Amino acid sequence: MYSLGIDAGSRYTKFALMNGSGILELAIIPADWNTRELAWQMTDVLCQKQGIRRSDIRITATGYGRASIDADAAVTEITCHALGVRHLNPAVRTVIDIGGQDSKVIACDANGAIVDFIMNDKCAAGTGKFLEIMLDKLGETFDTLDATVTGAVPATITSTCAVFAESEFIGLRAAGTGRAEIFAGVIASAAGKAASLAARVRVEDIVFLSGGLSASRAVCTALAACLGRSVATSPDAQFAGAIGAAIKGNSDM
């Protein structure tokens, strides 16, 4: 029996197909109003690639849109992210996940069990959506983010609200502050908000950054500076929730 984890996020839906503890396929598609249909289409694609039938897999859904997925089970994203990150790095004790519209911090014990967690789902500041808005205003993309801010001295952005931070951004542009400095400041601000959230649980090494922003070296560096400790990640960190869902599904078989 195969296990498929589907993490239906606010910006992207991630898929992890596993056979036991081995990852067979990882896939990601932009979120859409019809998450159910897109999820089934991608499930068929993954099954065809592996030469298996849909009836051969157990599907476990997690994330923002998990209720819209036709799955065998739905599991909270806290549980799935902890399981997924532990699969990627068993030594992790603190998980910081910066998603499209929320952020979460999970504290784990030496056995990987969750001992505490906190979520910020009330404000867009510091989330992937906020950075996406700022990138668009600068005419940049996430792929060029690291190159844009390399060597830049971050501008000071003090607002704790995404709306006010956007106004501050406009003011900095009008004052002639360079785009690299402004966006370095946006990254520093987002990292500071994640670190402030993390301070509300017990942060212990090893700290692991998951979510789409984990692909940015600049974000990882800024977060490490705010936390005062190193931050690990993985090329598959964006799939942590989906991997954890697949692992949970496998354990429930």
Image (spheres, rainbow, N blue to C red):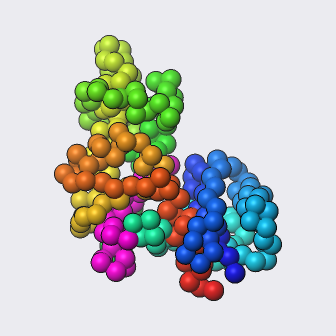
Q: Farthest residue toward the bottom?
A: 253
Relative side of 158 to 10, left or right: left
Examine the rendering and report whether any part of residue 10 can be seen. yes
Q: Is residue 40 magenta?
A: no
Q: Nearer the viewer, residue 147 or 197?
A: 147
Classify residue 29 as left or right of residue 236: right
| Residue 112 part of the magenta-drawn span | yes
Location of residue 54 by image quarter: bottom right
Rendering coords of residue 237 (x, y %): 47, 56
Residue 45, percent from left and from top = 77, 58
Task: Report how many numbered discs are placed on residues in the image.
Answer: 0
Measured as percent of width and height from the top left, residue 33 is found at 70, 51
Q: Residue at x 29, y 42 (%)?
A: 222
The boundaries of the magenta stretch are 90-113
Q: Judge by depth and name the residue closer to the eye, 33 or 99.
A: 99
Which residue is drawn at the image coordinates 35% and 29% (left, top)?
A: 149
Relative side of 139 to 116, left or right: right
Left or right, 176 with respect to 73, comes to left
Residue toward you, 163 or 96:
96
**Quadrant location, the N terminus:** bottom right
Q: Is residue 62 visible?
A: no
Residue 157 sits above or below residue 198 on the image:
above
- Please name the residue shown 26% across and 35% down the image: 158
Q: Position of residue 15 (x, y in %)?
A: 63, 61
Q: Residue at x 75, y 61 (%)?
A: 49
Which quadrant, please, contains the C terminus?
bottom right
The residue closer to the viewer here, 46 or 226, is: 46
